Image (cartoon, rainbow, N blue to C red):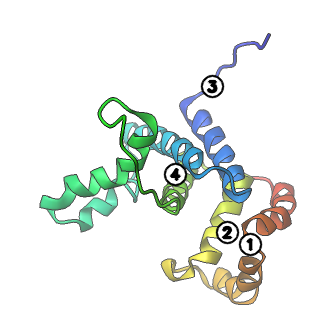
Amino acid sequence: MMKNITISKLDAAKRQLETVIRLYFLDGDPVSIHTLTSAAYNVIRDVNVKRGGDPMFVKDKALEFVKPEYRKEFRESLNKAENFFKHADKDHDQTLDFNPDQSEMLIWDAISTYSNLTGETPPLFKIFQAWFVCNKPEMFVPPEQIKRWLATTGPELASIGKTGFFNKWLPVVMQLGT
């Protein structure tokens, strides 16, 4: 029989994100990835609000760029898959067209906010961040050192695929620690 464990909200979110990242890199089930990502995201978001942190990007700051009359629709579209995967009280006979890529932005945003709240960036978070930047360089304005690294190493790393990237860099990042 297992003993009870004492766990904080942020530790629960960290564990969920670490599990999500493993599933993501090993091509795990996209529905499970999104559901677990959403749970971690919402915990981090709630803690961030209670601590007076800067608004998270995906579900908060992005609304600044949406016209007021479309904000409710925008918010509902962000939460549609999350709610569909968790509830069946109003739509038990429905189906959903789901794009698994939407989980990536939530993971990235949750990782960034978790790191801001705790001052730590666990190794698995670093792996995801590196992969994300390598595969979406057009989205970021990285410092010069990262630009040089991306120019020389980024394309090769991106070409080995998610699982290859994960397997190559996990041992290196684990040695570096948090």
Q: Are marks 4 and 3 in contact (CB under 8 Å)?
A: no
**What amino acid type is highlighted by mark number 2?**
Ala
Marker disc for residue 161: 1
Query: In the image, residue 35 lies at what x, y percent?
Result: 52, 43
- Position of the N terminus, as image quadrant, is top right
Question: Is residue 48 visible in this depiction of the protein?
Answer: no
Closer to the chain start, of discs 4 and 3, is 3
| Nearer to the camera, 85 or 134 | 85
Q: Are marks 4 and 2 in contact (CB under 8 Å)?
A: no
Measured Cα–Cα span from mark 1 to mark 3: 34 Å
Name the residue tied to disc 4: 110
For this orientation, the residue located farthest to the top is 1
Name the residue tied to disc 2: 130
Question: Is residue 38 visible in this depiction of the protein?
Answer: yes
Secondary-structure class at tag 4: helix
Callout 2 environment at 10 Å: few (<14), some (14 to 19), or many (20+)?
some
Q: Are marks 4 and 1 in contact (CB under 8 Å)?
A: no
Name the residue tied to disc 3: 7
The image quarter containing residue 123 is bottom right
Closer to the chain start, of discs 2 and 3, is 3
Measured Cα–Cα span from mark 4 to mark 1: 23 Å
**What amino acid type is highlighted by mark number 3?**
Ile
The residue shown at (61%, 73%) is 133
Closer to the chain start, of discs 4 and 2, is 4
Residue 38 lies left or right of residue 169; in this view the side is left
Closer to the chain start, of discs 4 and 1, is 4
The residue shown at (77%, 83%) is 156
Closer to the chain start, of discs 1 and 3, is 3
Q: From the viewer's perspective, is the residue at label 4 or at label 1 nearer? A: 1
Q: From the viewer's perspective, is the residue at label 1 or at label 3 nearer? A: 1
| Nearer to the camera, 71 or 110 | 71
Callout 4 environment at 10 Å: few (<14), some (14 to 19), or many (20+)?
many
